[in-house]
Image (cartoon, grey):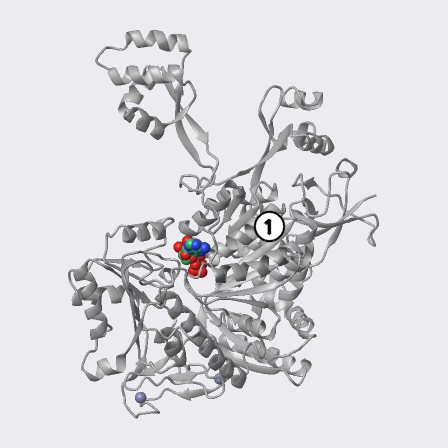
Amino acid sequence: MLIAQVIVDVPTNQTNHTFDYLIPPPLEDIVEKGMRVSVPFGPRKVMGFVLDVVSQSEWDKLKDIDEVLDIHPILTEELLELGKWISEQTTSFYIQTFQAMLPQVLKASYKKEIEALTEVDLSPAFQQLFAGRAVIDYQEFIERNGDHKQLLEEVNQGHLHINYIVKSKETNKTKTFVAPNKDLLILEEAIEDISARAKKQKEIIEYFIQYPEPIEKQELFKKLQTTSSTVNQLIKKDLLKTVEKKVYRDPFQAEHFQRTEPLPLSKQQQEALDPIHQAIDQAENEVFLLHGVTGSGKTEVYLQAIAKVIEQGQEAIVLVPEISLTPQMVQRFKGRFGSQVAVLHSALSPGEKFDEWTKIHKKEVKVVVGARSAIFAPFENIGIIIIDEEHETSYKQDEQPRYHAREIAKWRGTFHHCPIVLGSATPMLESYARAKKGVYHLLNMPDRMNNTEMPPVEVVDMRDELHAGNRSMFSRRLLEAIQTRIDRGEQVVLFLNRRGYSTFVMCRECGEVMKCPNCDIALTYHKSSHQLKCHYCDYQVPMVKECTSCGSNTIRYFGTGTQKVEESLKEHIPEATVIRMDVDTTRRKGSHKRLLEQFGQGKAQILLGTQMIAKGLDFANVTLVGVLAIDTMLHLPDFRSSEKTFQLLTQVSGRAGRHKLPGEVVIQTYTPEHYSIEYASQYNYQQFFSQEMEMRRSFGYPPYYYLTLITVTHANAFKAEEVTRTICKLLFKHLSPDARVLGPTPSPMVRINNRYRYQCMVKYKDEPNQRDIIRKIQQHYNEEVHRDNLTIQVDFEPYSFM
Ligand code: ADP
Ligand code: ZN
Ligand code: ZN
């Protein structure tokens, strides 16, 4: 008797453990760990993951597994272990984690079919089943034959293939092909009948006599310099026909990848690569922090590290932030490793993602380049994991399971005994601190590849503008600089921090921002109560009328959107042509890329945008980068706001003067004396690091303390606050006296979708029981969560504080 231990797709506290199911005899040799099965659960049938196959159960009345959904395990043993670990670390349900590790298609409903790759080699039973057909429904197999063992054998011998068919229009890409509809002899005869004047028609038929295979319609038009109407006449005469054909979804197929060879390395590149190569050679699980300025040639180091990994027959995972997963980036990997590379990012349709994932699962590729979830690539012999722009917060998933890709990378690195490379021009404080302590191996690349200096940065004090009577959002200096570029036919990039959350108050006269004395966080203005509140602790004061620093009454909230900037720009410089890039203009698939292409082709002089233009842009003609209202970022209610500002400014500055023309950067701010602006304008990471560490130490933030953020939401504000208060009390009571429990306080976005949000924050150094306590709290509220629509979100080491 064999029993499968199954995690079922019912994400609740009570069902967050394995259930035992009997494996019926026909499935005995089939069911393996890591496969998905369909099982009866109460009155329903649900999907589940087989975690283990055992021979005994403590329960006596077991139900049978209904069906096996996979022919081969879809999660490797490593990924099963990893999934359990993540669930425990993030206190999420096992089922949530396993699903997060797989492409979406495998979560949704889909149809399976069996394709015969050969007829003669098939066993008689299958020959009979297929009866000359090339493809049959999986369902038909279940009903008429159902012998999984035989099926598996045929699949393993390469006679049969199981296809997952995605039931979605978008994912089933077809193209129209044109093909001959008659015998060649008939076509030859037909040529005689076509009138001499219809020369094009004759040519087409002649073409098909020579090449009778179906050809894609557009390609035919191009090849024969013809049009749809000519082809349609031949279709009308029944000589040709159209066929819809499914095309393999390769999102980058159309683009031409020029093969590249490894470049001879610079000295600093060689010195960075050597220790990495050594770690690969000796299968050492070491974490490297590659601190290299923009343009220092980090990517070439990654490429040559991967080359060695492939040479050893191993595989590589490369993570890049979604936003910088541009065609240029993909080009660099595909250019070097060609079809050995799979690419995973969110711009792909679910079907395309599944295709890429399948290539990894079948080991048809050696390298995956992708955004966060690519860290779960089902490789089994990993030789290196690289995380580029390691400081990017998008590596943390903001829903359950709230994992950070870096931590997953470390776990897998330990499992596979392979090195991890974290690369950045502006490493996260936590990472750099670890490198300084020797936990990570620090590699430095301080010089740019072409030895050009970073462009000079000018910081414009907006308070002076106000004093001079300029109330617009553009300083005189920036306007003049823009005008000069337009006159010279050069291009400008204008950057504005993402719109949205900006309700801090600032004095326009002196730049003073109202802050919490305990947390050093900008206070948030609450309209309803007319109060200023801290979002970490419960500090609050009535809204001030006068600046506490200079007494001026020019104190107000701050923030503006890209659209307003565009309008204002047009008022000042009517002849300027602008491409605006923000969430509104890039909603449609492909628009991001199209807008960038237009700018690259010089169709506009100014590119105006939010975060999404900060990275990876490389345009030879851009000689000026302007940063408007950086203050909105500097004063986010987030203890990392200084760090984020520093990172962003460094990144944007890297956009100017990347080629022959010298570049310049202009930053507008009301607080030019702030250290993150000052050091960013000098490209001084070291100084920034020391000063920021000082701040973190005195206010008790990472890397000196760990944080846990618990957010409670409910339709009733009192209820949300009351539950949060109880949670704070429970944590205070059960955690060690060294832990600090802050709250309850309203979240920065206190109301979303008519739900009120309150939070509790824990600062701690070492609390081994924390997760157990939190689990118990979650269980305690379990019933209310279901009955009363209460939510309790727990985020360990949070990156977002909204
Ligand atoms: P980073 O990733 O550190 O910002 P890149 O990898 O983009 O830097 O390198 C900057 C530029 O230098 C790129 O155009 C790249 O092709 C070029 N480059 C990198 N390494 C070399 C090398 N060893 N020899 C010549 N050019 C190089
Ligand atoms: Zn003031
Ligand atoms: Zn506070």
Q: Residue at x 32, y 58 (%)?
A: 659
Q: Position of residue 636 (x, y in %)?
A: 42, 75
Neighbour tally class for label 1: few under 14, some 14-19, many 20 plus, Cα within 10 Å: many
Q: Position of residue 561 (x, y in %)?
A: 30, 67
Whether ligand 1 has any atom under 8 Å from the Cβ at mark 1 is answered as: no
Left or right: 608, with 164 as reference point = left
Depicted 481 relative to depicted 661: above or below = below
Mark 1 lies on a secondary structure that is helix
Q: Position of residue 278 (x, y in %)?
A: 62, 58
Q: Position of residue 699 (x, y in %)?
A: 52, 84
Q: Is residue 699 visible?
A: yes
Q: Residue at x 54, y 81 (%)?
A: 743
Quadrant position of residue 194:
top left
Amino acid type at image mark 1? Val
Quadrant position of residue 260:
top left
The residue singled out by tag 1 in the image is 309
